[in-house]
Image (spheres, coloured by chain):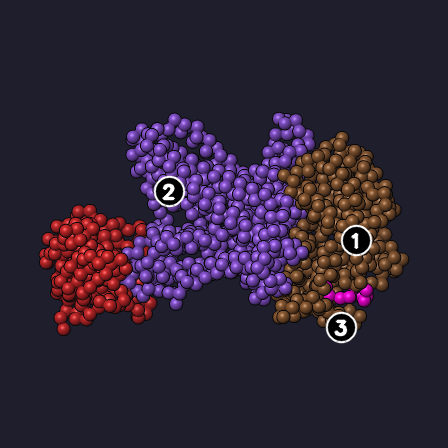
């Protein structure tokens, strides 16, 4: 039984991706037999290339993805280089998990509330400093260059890459290298970049690729912060896929394949960039420069990192204030008065939706956990660890753009007659939940001292007794953390819920994004907050439960 | 029926290259000391005997315990106790639960509890059953680990640098306790160490392992 | 050959007669009891969502019908869904039982035989519907023929904040002149949003000397000539729009916070009572008022339709009938609830029923039926489809 789990896991993770891509490729070449259309034909691509907004949409997708990734990576690398091991760094480190769990949509709403011409920042400065008694007519949110969208992506990707970097540093032993470099007269930042970064980067490379693919194809953030004349390619794909005119579906499928090609192209471009940076870096190392600009870069990077963290926190505060606001006009910093009216109206619905959200997330996470634990246990018993290729397979569902395979998956499920209800949504979530649970649990699971298992079996315990009575309880904290990560991933899923659920499954995220079009900031505040809570509470429980359960077991709290 | 642990023509290979070779019989109540520089594969030898050899290694030869060939038995059925340099007490269980974990099933709740209390009393730890292992001193932990192993009724004892973490006077004390108990119970003991004092205290045969692969 | 047969099967009309039969109302209510109706309706407005929830409570109480509101961002999603189900052969119990629909979505579904019916004119409450005075039997010039039932009347009104824009405007040309003097203070939702395309129609209808040409389908011959004044108008207006027309609000309600913050002085709405409702909900300042143009504004009815493959058509008809009841209509017209215009004929109601309507306070920003003036007819949908496409080409991708 255990032997088949790795294969089953791969099937659960990659099956939908492969099937979805197939379901996309067929209509992209004009083949949709159910509608009486038989391919192959290049008409869908002709109609795609005939769309006037194509070049702008493509440019937007590529530029926002690459710029958001570069900026996030730069902030993370410079902060880690300049500050790791300091007190400021550990403060940032402690803020990571909560920041990471804030769903993208909620963070984007919060950011919009901050930076819009009528947002909190402008209100704080007006009219005293700016002279504005009405919001200026400035294109800040939904700007054609996608700058607001890039900012929205950066504030969410910085915590993700930061966490990955910190995890990678555990294996790179940075302290010793840094000591040697500093003894040789290098500044902290330059020393770290020259000695530690190359090793750390090979570890976080796949996560960086994930950020590129994700940023290029995200839909919810693009709907909230991105431009609309035209929108990004992914948003346009979703529009085409839901057009009543059937031929638009074929165009959408063709665009989905283009999206896939764009992501592959961007990853290739990044790969070339890595080579160039490596070569330049090598020259820089050989030059022996000790780092003249360390101090300003350190300060600047910490500033940017703090801004990105506070953007999320104040954005959430903005959501909270709006949800309690009575009439509130510009340039007042706070509403005229506070009211429970909005919560009274939306609270009951939001709580019901929270139940549905947790039901979907809970089942998906339990399935993922069972598969992941089974794989890790099989790995432990066979003694064969995850290969490099296996790691790539694990990352694959995160690298294939969602907009490329989810529409195709929807069509296929429809053909199977399995399109209605929760179950398909749960399996679609599983595609994304599985890799994150695996990545989150893998390292702590493998770094567990297997001599405990040797001792236990020498004491006569069978393998399953070792698993249930020794390993699981000892690893309770990382298991709960992995579950919290999985729940946060599931809660944040927009496209998978929207397309696969066919409108019948609504979670806090789909409700919140649906409200975005209506512009009711009070209702958005309620749903954005609930969405954040849904992701944050499991993390809190993952901290509290082991502390309470093992309150008399000091050995588990180091 | 010959009591004892027999290692017959043991050879452990890594990637087809022989790493260690041992051919020795340890009689009941005797200690065999295996010495050698670190990295030579001493722990690998013990892993082969406990049945937990990593798949990167291949082992050949037979392990016989009290006349029975246990080479292909699963680890939990071999009845071989092992002590490592760390106590490896399960941190999520109380001291008493650690001991009960290794006890063969059966007996009422009260009887098992009494057995645990008695065993703790034997090593001067009366009343420790409900303690958190993390609150014990190094010597206390070592004694609990020993008692835990003995309560599982092993037929042989492996020591993997079992005393190297203890400071000097504690070390002699624990070592004497282990050897004395092994002798009382007539257990064959295989000790891996890099400390000549351990070997001297054991008083049995000594094998000096050399690196085969490096030569 | 097989393919031909399949296509033929898909093209052939699926239902000749409605089943269950709406004229046997007792049978319908009996079958409806216990059914769950998935009503796919736009979910972006919280007041509408609240009203739909109330409808759900009432039909459960009276008929044992469970109503689930599936919240859409775009009605076209529901149309696609039914279309996909038809392609997949899901003909008996589709995901959707009822859709809030009108205009081109209705035309598309009716055209593709995706609708259940005819049923609307057999519903008991059809007797009190104002067939003469309200456009309930044609939907954007397309004959309804009983394939959808009306539940609300909508008419374009302009929403102004009198604190910053004291005077109403009489025509689209006046709007352009005003926008030139007050740049950045007006916008409309981005087409193909429903209200956005309505603004384009309103502009065209008002600019043309004789808009009657719009009542017949657009042709390749007359399209360019008829719409040329519209593009000239928009070319002149766009630079003076909010954000210089480089971004647009997503929907009509998304413009309310912009008025509240003072970003906009003027916007449009398709619901004469929506502004008053928004004032009560703190979404608009109480200085907001509404006005209509001198020549009148476009109006139409909102309908509900039942997909051909609904497994709960009886339940859906019960809901559709309830929506046309005096009770539901009076509640919908209450500006504190929804502020939608009624489709009922006041003269056909009993004294008590009429009293419920007369008792309504319309709200400070709502025009009386007399002030709303004459309603201009919706153009044929073929105009709108082409205009929306052209708009996207000219202004929607124009970076």
Give me the chain that's brown: C
Give me the chain that's purple: A
Task: Check the rendered structure and report the hue given to chain B.
Answer: red
Q: CA distance from mark 3 to mark 1?
A: 40 Å
Q: Position of residue C146 (x, y in %)?
A: 79, 63
- Element at label 3: helix
Residue hosting label 1 = C217
User: Residue A338, can we see it?
Assistant: no
Give the residues drawn in magenta, as a range: C115-124
Q: Contact (CB < 8 A) between labels 1 and 2?
A: no
Q: Which mark is residue C181?
A: none
Mark found first going from the N terminus, 3 or 1: 3
Say yes or no: labels 1 and 2 on the same chain. no
Q: Which residue appears at 53% of the width and 46% of the height?
A: A216
Q: Nearer the viewer, mark 1 or mark 2?
A: 1
Q: Contact (CB < 8 A) between labels 3 and 1?
A: no
Q: Chain of mark 2?
A: A
Left/right of residue B190 with respect to residue C196 in the rendered view: left
Residue hosting label 3 = C27
Q: Is residue B114 above or below residue B198?
A: below
Q: Position of residue A246 (x, y in %)?
A: 65, 57
Q: Is residue C116 magenta?
A: yes
Q: CA distance from mark 2 to mark 3?
A: 72 Å
Q: Position of residue C321 (x, y in %)?
A: 77, 63
Q: Position of residue A212 (x, y in %)?
A: 49, 45
Q: Which mark is residue A200?
A: 2
Say yes or no: labels 2 and 3 on the same chain. no
Give the camera-side residue of A170 and A323: A170
């Amino acid at each position: 039984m255990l032997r088949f789990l790795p294969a089953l896991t791969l099937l659960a993770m990659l099956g939908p991706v492969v099937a979805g891509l197939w379901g996309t490729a067929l209509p992209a070449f004009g083949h949709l037999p159910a509608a009486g259309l038989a391919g192959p034909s290049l008409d869908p691509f002709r109609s795609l290339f005939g769309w006037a907004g194509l070049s702008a949409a493509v440019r937007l997708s590529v530029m926002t993805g690459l710029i958001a990734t570069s900026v996030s990576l730069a902030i993370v690398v410079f902060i880690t280089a300049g500050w790791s091991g300091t007190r400021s760094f550990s403060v940032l480190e402690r803020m990571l998990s909560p920041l990471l769990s804030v769903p993208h949509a909620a963070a984007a709403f919060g950011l919009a509330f901050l930076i819009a011409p009528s947002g909190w920042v402008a209100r704080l400065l007006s009219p005293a400093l700016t002279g504005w008694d009405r919001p200026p007519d400035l294109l800040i949110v939904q700007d054609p260059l996608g700058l607001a969208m890039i900012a929205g992506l950066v504030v969410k990707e910085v915590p993700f890459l930061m966490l990955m970097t910190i995890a990678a540093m555990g294996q790179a032993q940075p302290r010793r290298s840094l000591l040697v470099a500093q003894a040789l007269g290098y500044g902290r930042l330059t020393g770290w970049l020259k000695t530690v970064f190359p090793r750390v980067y090979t570890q976080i490379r796949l996560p960086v690729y994930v950020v590129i693919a994700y940023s290029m194809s995200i839909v919810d953030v693009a709907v909230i912060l991105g431009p609309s004349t035209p929108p990004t390619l992914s948003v346009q794909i979703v529009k085409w896929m839901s057009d009543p005119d059937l031929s638009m579906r074929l165009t959408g499928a063709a665009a989905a394949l283009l999206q896939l090609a764009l992501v592959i192209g961007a990853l290739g471009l990044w790969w070339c960039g890595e080579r160039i940076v490596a070569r330049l870096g090598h020259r820089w190392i050989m030059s022996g420069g000790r780092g003249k600009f360390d101090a300003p870069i350190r300060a600047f990077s910490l500033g940017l990192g703090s801004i990105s963290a506070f953007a999320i926190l104040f954005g959430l505060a903005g959501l909270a204030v709006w949800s309690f606001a009575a009439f509130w006009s510009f340039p007042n910093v706070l509403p005229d008065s506070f009211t429970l009216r909005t919560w009274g109206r939306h609270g009951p619905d939001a709580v019901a939706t929270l139940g549905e959200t947790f039901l979907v997330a809970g089942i998906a996470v339990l399935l993922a956990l069972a598969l992941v634990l089974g794989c890790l246990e099989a790995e432990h018993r066979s003694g064969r660890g995850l290969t490099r290729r296996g790691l790539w397979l694990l990352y694959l569902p995160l690298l294939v753009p969602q907009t490329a395979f989810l529409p195709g998956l929807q069509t296929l499920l429809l053909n199977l007659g399995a399109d209605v209800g929760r179950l398909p949504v749960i399996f679609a979530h599983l595609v994304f939940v599985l890799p994150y649970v695996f990545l989150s649990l893998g390292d702590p699971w493998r770094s567990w001292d297997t001599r405990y298992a040797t001792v236990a079996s020498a004491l006569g315990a069978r393998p399953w007794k070792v698993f249930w009575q020794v390993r699981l309880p000892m690893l309770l904290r990382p298991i709960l953390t992995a579950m919290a990560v999985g729940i946060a991933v599931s809660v944040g899923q927009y496209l998978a819920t929207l397309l696969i659920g066919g409108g019948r499954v609504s979670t806090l995220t789909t409700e919140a994004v649906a409200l975005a079009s209506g512009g009711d900031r009070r209702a958005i505040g309620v749903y954005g907050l609930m969405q954040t809570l849904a992701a944050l509470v499991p993390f809190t429980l993952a901290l509290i439960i082991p502390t309470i359960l093992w309150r008399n077991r000091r050995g588990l709290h180091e | 029926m010959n009591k004892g642990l027999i290692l017959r023509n043991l050879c452990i290979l890594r990637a087809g290259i022989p790493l260690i070779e041992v051919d020795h019989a340890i009689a009941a109540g005797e200690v065999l000391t295996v010495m050698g520089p670190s990295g030579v594969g001493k722990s690998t030898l013990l892993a082969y005997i406990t049945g937990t050899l990593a798949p990167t290694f291949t082992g050949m030869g037979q392990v016989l315990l009290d006349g029975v060939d246990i080479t292909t038995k699963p680890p939990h059925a071999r009845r071989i106790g092992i002590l490592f340099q760390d106590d490896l007490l399960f941190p999520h269980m109380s001291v008493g639960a650690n001991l009960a974990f290794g006890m063969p099933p059966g007996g009422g709740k009260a009887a098992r509890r009494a057995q645990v209390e008695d065993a703790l009393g034997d090593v001067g730890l009366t009343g420790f059953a409900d303690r958190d292992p993390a609150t014990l001193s190094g010597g206390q932990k070592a004694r609990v680990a020993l008692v835990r192993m003995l309560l599982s009724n092993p037929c042989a004892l492996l020591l993997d640098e079992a005393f190297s973490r203890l400071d000097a006077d504690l070390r002699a004390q624990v070592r004497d306790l282990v050897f004395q108990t092994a002798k009382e119970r007539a257990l064959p003991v295989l000790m891996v160490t890099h400390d000549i004092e351990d070997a001297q205290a054991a008083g049995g045969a000594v094998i000096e392992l050399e690196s085969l692969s490096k030569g | 050959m097989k393919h031909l047969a399949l296509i033929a099967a898909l093209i052939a009309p699926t239902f000749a007669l409605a089943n269950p039969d709406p004229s046997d109302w007792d049978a319908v209510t009996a079958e409806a009891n216990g059914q769950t109706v998935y009503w796919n309706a736009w979910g972006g407005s919280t007041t509408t969502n609240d009203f739909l929830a109330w409808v759900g409570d009432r039909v459960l109480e009276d008929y044992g019908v469970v109503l689930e509101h599936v919240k859409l961002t775009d009605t076209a999603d529901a149309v696609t869904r039914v279309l996909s189900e038809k392609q997949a052969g899901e003909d008996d119990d589709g995901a959707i039982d009822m859709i809030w629909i009108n205009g081109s979505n209705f035309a598309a579904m009716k055209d593709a035989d995706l609708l259940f019916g005819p049923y609307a004119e057999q519903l008991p409450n059809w007797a009190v519907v104002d067939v003469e005075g309200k456009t309930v039997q044609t939907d954007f010039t397309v004959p309804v023929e009983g394939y959808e039932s009306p539940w609300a009347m909508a008419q374009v009104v302009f929403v102004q904040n009198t604190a910053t824009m004291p005077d109403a405007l009489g025509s689209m040309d006046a709007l352009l002149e005003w926008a030139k003097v007050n740049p950045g203070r007006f916008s409309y939702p981005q087409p193909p949003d429903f209200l956005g395309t309505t603004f384009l129609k309103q502009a065209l209808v008002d600019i043309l000397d004789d808009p009657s040409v719009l009542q017949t389908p657009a042709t390749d011959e007359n399209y360019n000539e008829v719409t040329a004044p519209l593009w000239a108008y928009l070319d002149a207006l766009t630079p003076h729009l909010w954000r210089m027309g480089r971004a647009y609000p997503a929907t009509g309600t998304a413009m309310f916070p912009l008025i509240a913050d003072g970003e906009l002085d003027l916007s449009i709405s398709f619901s004469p009572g929506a502004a008053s409702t928004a004032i009560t909900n703190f979404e608009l300042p109480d200085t907001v008022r509404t006005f209509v143009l001198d020549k009148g504004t476009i109006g139409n009815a909102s309908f509900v339709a039942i997909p051909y493959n609904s497994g709960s058509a009886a339940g859906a008809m019960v809901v559709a009938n309830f929506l046309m009841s005096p009770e539901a209509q009076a509640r919908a017209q209450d500006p504190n609830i929804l502020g939608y215009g009624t489709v009922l004929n006041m003269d056909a109601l009993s004294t008590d029923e009429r009293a419920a309507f007369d008792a309504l306070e319309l709200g400070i920003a709502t025009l009386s039926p007399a002030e709303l003036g004459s309603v201009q007819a919706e153009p044929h949908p073929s105009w709108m489809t082409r205009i929306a496409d052209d708009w996207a080409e000219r202004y929607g991708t124009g970076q």
